[in-house]
Image (tube, rainbow, N blue to C red):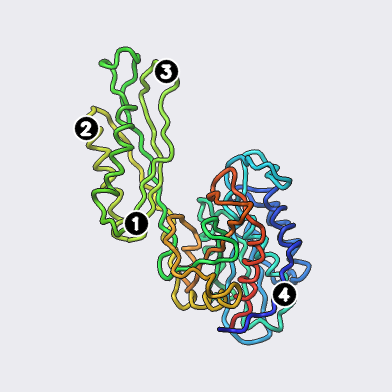
Amino acid sequence: MMAPPSIEVPTEELIRYRRHFHAHPELSLEEYETAAFIERELLEVFDLRDLRTGVAKTGILATLRGSKPGPVTLLRADMDGLPMDETNDVPYRSQRSGAMHACGHDGHMAVLLAAARALARRREEVCGTLVFCFQPGEEGPAGNKLMIEEGALESPHVDRTFALHLYSGLEVGKIGVRDGAFFAASDRFDIALLGKGGHGAMPQFSVDPIVAAGQLVGALQTIVSREVAPKDPLVVTVGSLHAGTTFNVIPDRAELRGTVRSFDPAVRAAVPERMERIVEGICDALRLDYTFEYLWGYPPTVNDPAMNAIVRTVGDAVVGAENVVYPADLMLWAEDMAYMQELRPGAYFVVGVRGPEIGFEPQHSARYDIDERALGVAYRMMVALGLHP
């Protein structure tokens, strides 16, 4: 085991940063105030020449050239909140209606910002070059891909990447990592069922899209239960169903939207045909027309075993081998860091945030919060990864 680097945790700074970001969330590709705050803090220890701002609208790349030879390592945090209202009654609750940091990105930024400032002061210990990537638009617009298109992996040419996610599925003090595919591919579907509206008391004169929608929601689950091997993880979720305006009118139209999560490329590729076959069959049987749109989203997030070995080595030193969960369970989340990890060897790991007062509350919940002791664990991991040759 490597000797653990001497890393003092700036607890007050981490909490101050995290609570500031939590109280002032901004939605995807609109993180202008967030970016301005990060830039001001970085300029205290970075030269302006080392900062690239406005990457993919609001992203920031801060480059730190170490005093020793070594690889170019990118450390990344995502910046955006979610379009939802917070229900937590805490002093740092969201001050913006319709926006909330319900996925931990506030903590990710706090950790990377504090780590960047610390590592800038320890430049003489850094082997190679570090690129601190503050990325916008993870929650849908693929801000990671947009940053790549604007040169985030070049000038300097990045050799390896590391990123973390705060995770309520693990207790504070633990980290989790897995070789190969860790997070799922995420795709989206939009279905419109087109019938003929009429009076709710005279359904014989209508073609009811709501009845078809009800059958379709259940039938789509047979893709998972009857068309894919149990060993291949797959999720088909209808997350939105809209139809009608009142209790006694059959509408003309019903709209369904949802997500598909998968790991295996062959399983993923076959889903659209299987879905449309079911949609077409139900519509034929019930005399409806339909439209079907399938939108390919983020690919799986695949960890490089050599990069994972670095995370595990650092984790053994920082939290102890008994607190490194390896291999961690597959996650059906999706993560646009997948795009960078398609192009460069990288490792994505999770950091536990569940504590005695903050129990399990899943990401994307209006009640999501963290045990802030987790910030220190994540900070020590990021700093140690920055110091790893």
**To which residue does mark 2 refer?**
284
Gap between marks 2 and 1 measured at Cα: 30 Å
**To which residue does mark 1 refer?**
233
Looking at marks 4 and 2 on the same chain, the residue that comes earlier in the sequence is marked by 4
Gap between marks 3 and 1 measured at Cα: 39 Å
Secondary element type, mark 3? loop
Gap between marks 3 and 2 measured at Cα: 26 Å
Looking at marks 2 and 1 on the same chain, the residue that comes earlier in the sequence is marked by 1
Q: Residue furthest bottom?
A: 69
Secondary element type, mark 4? helix
Q: Is residue 92 above or below residue 36?
A: above
**To which residue does mark 4 refer?**
120
**Other residues around mark 4 within 10 Å, as few (<14) / some (14–19) / many (≥20):** many
Q: Position of residue 55 (x, y in %)?
A: 61, 60
Looking at marks 3 and 1 on the same chain, the residue that comes earlier in the sequence is marked by 1
Q: Residue furthest right?
A: 44
**To which residue does mark 3 refer?**
247
Q: Quadrant of residue 51?
A: bottom right
